[in-house]
Image (cartoon, helix red, strand yellow):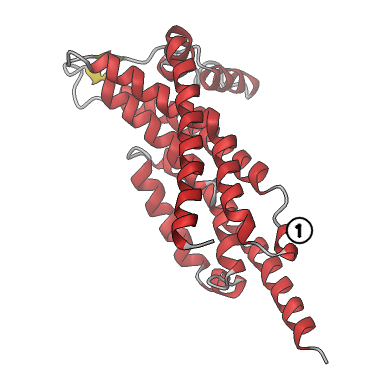
Amino acid sequence: MTFLQHLEELRWHIVRSVLAILLAAIALFVFKDFVFGQVILSPTKPDFATYKFLCWFSNQLGMGDKLCIGSIPLTLLNTEMVGQFLAHIRISLSLGLVLASPYVFWEVWRFVRPALYANEMKHTRGFVLITTLLFLVGVLFSYFVIVPFSVTFLGTYQVDPAVSNQIRLSSYVQFLTMLCFAGGIIFQLPIATWLLSKIGVVTPQFMKKYRKHSLIAILIASAVITPPDVFSQILLAVPIYGLYEISIGISKRVHRKREENLAADTAP
């Protein structure tokens, strides 16, 4: 295929992906009450699943209600004429992307697959499934772990009792979507490592050598993504560092396979 033919092929993959996202977004737009009442605004309510688990865990440890969340003094406001409508559209599109992510990753795979050799195809089975699972796990981790702790910290933090927390709806929606999508992207680290190792850009020796530097970078990235409290930063940094260690193993396996193939090609 020529370069223009590749562009035409890519265009149709993008068009189909966008249509899938739009269809999912339209379906979510219709179920506004459930989307906002049970999903988007749930972390601002004391009966959220994470808060219930913390309360149960506190009682199991014999700490009473010390970890229970009684109330969150956070009020959401809309200060713009089209603010709520735009927030509705933004959330529908964001959740539409999450729901359509398996199909989107499949379209990406369909575009990349013809460029792979037969032996490479064998080692890339399950690419769509693994990529989708990592993305969804990252989104859910942020939603059930990072978001509630961030909301409770920022919602209860006051410089003075006379100052109440009245947050714009658009600010809350942007905050929620940023944290969730950041988690989904960060959890793609093993996939990125696999690809970079396949083309020889990353080696396990390189990742081991700069392990300490990577830990510092992870802590800095966690500090930027999460609110300014140490607990939320640690909650995000620990799984990221775990993914980094897993990525070292992935890179080691890919590098060993490359060496075996090279030895087989140069053998008399």
In the foreground, 203 or 233: 203
Numbered disc 1: secondary structure: helix
Query: Residue visible at 54% across and 35% down?
Result: 101
Q: Is residue 13 above or below residue 27?
A: below
Q: Report x, y in % for residue 142.
A: 49, 34
Residue 196 to residue 131: above or below: below
Q: Which percent across, then down, holds residue 23?
A: 49, 23
Nearer the observer, 16 or 82: 16
Instruction: Name the outermost residue toward the right.
Output: 268
| Quarter holding residue 267 | bottom right
Q: Residue at x 48, y 40 (%)?
A: 183
| Residue 234 against residue 208 in the figure, above or below | above
Identify residue type, mark 1. Answer: Lys
Horizontal and vertical percent position of residue 210? 50, 70
Observer-nearest of 200 and 229: 200
* Quarter containing the N terminus: bottom right
Q: Residue at x 55, y 16 (%)?
A: 52
185 relative position to 227: left or right: right
Residue 225 quadrant? top left
The residue beneath circle 1 is 122
- Can see residue 162? yes
Q: Residues within 10 Å of mark 1 (few under 14, many from 20)?
A: few
Q: Quadrant of the C terminus?
A: bottom right
Q: Is residue 42 visible?
A: no
Image position of 163 (left or right of 206)? left
Q: How many numbered marks, from 0 up?
A: 1
